[in-house]
Image: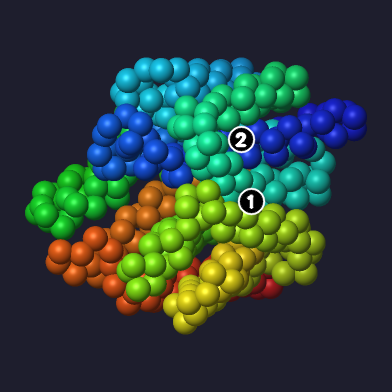
Amino acid sequence: MKASPVARSEARLLVPALMFIALVVAAVASLGTPLITSVATSFHVSLGSAQWTLTVALLSGAVATPVLGRLGAGPHRRATILATLAVVVAGSALTVLPLPFAWLLAGRAAQGVGLGLTALMMGVARDHLPEERSAAVIALISVVSIIGAGVGYPLAALLAEFGGVRAAYGLGLVVTAAALLTAWRSMPEAPEGRSAHVDVAGAVVLTAALLLVLFLAGERNLWSRHLAVAAGLAVVAVVLLCVWAVIELRSTTPLVDVRAMRHPAVAGANLAMFVGGIGMYLLLTLITRYAQTPHGAGYGFGLTTFVAGLVLIPFSVLGFVAGKLTPRVRTRIADPLLLAGSAVVVGGGFALFAAARSDLAELFAAMCVLGFGVGGFSAAMPGVVLAVTPKSETSSAMSFNYVVRSVGYSLGSAIGGLILAAGTDPGHLLPDDSAYTTAALVGIGAMAITTLTSLALARRRSSETNP
């Protein structure tokens, strides 16, 4: 199927539109992170309940991503994008209106659906831009979807500090409405001759499996107090994922083409994304939590939510820089080697955090290293997956990769919480400083696995191109 390029003037508008939409949906979904404490206070709920304002967005995003990816592979991609953004705007309105806590959760779930649009933005770029241009744009979309958290976090924290939690969520309403208007004016129709059907049975089973996975990742107390129950639910989740894989293999219109996922390059890329995602989000969680730990713990800097959010700015800036550099480097270095190199950089961030964190400048340095590594990794990942993926399956293939990423991020956050909880002495609220070192060492191990997986991909590609 030939791509249908847009006119040059329209392309100039299309590229920033794709970037803006990807940035907005990522930033809005991340709004739950800095507002958890404010939500607990404003709605008189526990911190555990308030945590669901983040978890429910991740869950709905993980579920919506493969469904939207399949719809985006069909003839109604523009309508799918507009309808999804309309849902996100409606959810944003629910978070602003003076309604009970349950409605806030419903609004956050609707906002999380927008996370599924990132893969569709990549599909639009691959279909409607010249090949050399689309590769660079897809890499930047991938990076923007990561650094959106670094953009949204300090802004939301600042608004919450001065105007309350409703004002912070009001930011989400404004930018999502702007994204909907942008999409309405700039999104082209999909190329003709495509069809896409949603595998409803597969979607239901995948939803149940992901619900269990993210629930287990978010409910850390369940693992420490009811280990047998947690282990049993984990087994059920694995069984459901296996059932889902069987359904997809037998379906003539699978939600995700599992057969394509068995290709060594795609399988390796998804494994690298999963383990790498655990490591990347683990370090992000460690640094932000460490920065906000009060001085009374014997470590930490006691930063407010807003000031701690500023620590994420170098993460976003260096991530964007790496994303801009990666397309140029790709002409000399293969994507799997870029993945390996980026994983090493993230591992270096862990090593820096483990060895030196007594000064705030050292935290900024670790965040810079993390941002550069994550930016390079995110920019290189689409090239690995799409090198063996037909154009018509761009949205579907990348949506599965993003589901893997979401689960990896959730597990990274949960693993960090479990390690810090294990390092907290009885009767104490805060973990020992050594628990952070232990978590950093676990992260180094995760990035080592990611590096080895990426090197194996590079070796395989080299053997295929030079028989």
With 402 as the anchor, is 426 left or right in this view? left
Residue at (64% x, 60% y) in the render: 314
Number of the label disc, if any, that sits on residue 143: 1
Q: What residue sits 70% from the left and 39% below the top?
A: 19
Coloration of the structure image:
rainbow
Q: Nearer the viewer, residue 342 or 103?
A: 103
Q: Position of residue 80 (x, y in %)?
A: 57, 21
Q: Position of residue 281 (x, y in %)?
A: 45, 57
**Residue 339: x %, y % from top left:** 59, 65
Viewer-closest of 434 and 10: 434
Callout 1 secondary element: helix
Q: What residue sits 63% from the left and 28% below the top?
A: 175
Answer whether labels 2 and 1 touch (C-beta < 8 Å): no
Tell me the SS state at disc 2: helix
Q: Which residue bears the numbered disc 2?
A: 24
Q: Nearer the viewer, residue 120 or 325?
A: 325
Query: Which quadrant, please, contains the C terminus?
Result: bottom right
Q: Which of 420 and 179 is in front in this view?
A: 420
Query: Can residue 251 be seen here?
Result: no
Q: Which residue lies furthest to the bottom in this view?
A: 355
Q: Which residue is drawn at 67% across and 24% down?
A: 178
Quadrant in which the N terminus appears: top right
Where residue 20 sits, quadrant-wise, is top right
Residue type, mark 2 in image = Val
Where is residue 223, by image quadrant?
Answer: bottom left
* Residue 463 vertical position relative to residue 121 in the rendered view, above or below: below
* Image: 93 above or below 458: above
Q: Earlier in the sequence, mark 2 or mark 1?
A: 2
Q: Is residue 426 visible?
A: yes
- Label 2 vs label 1: CA separation? 13 Å
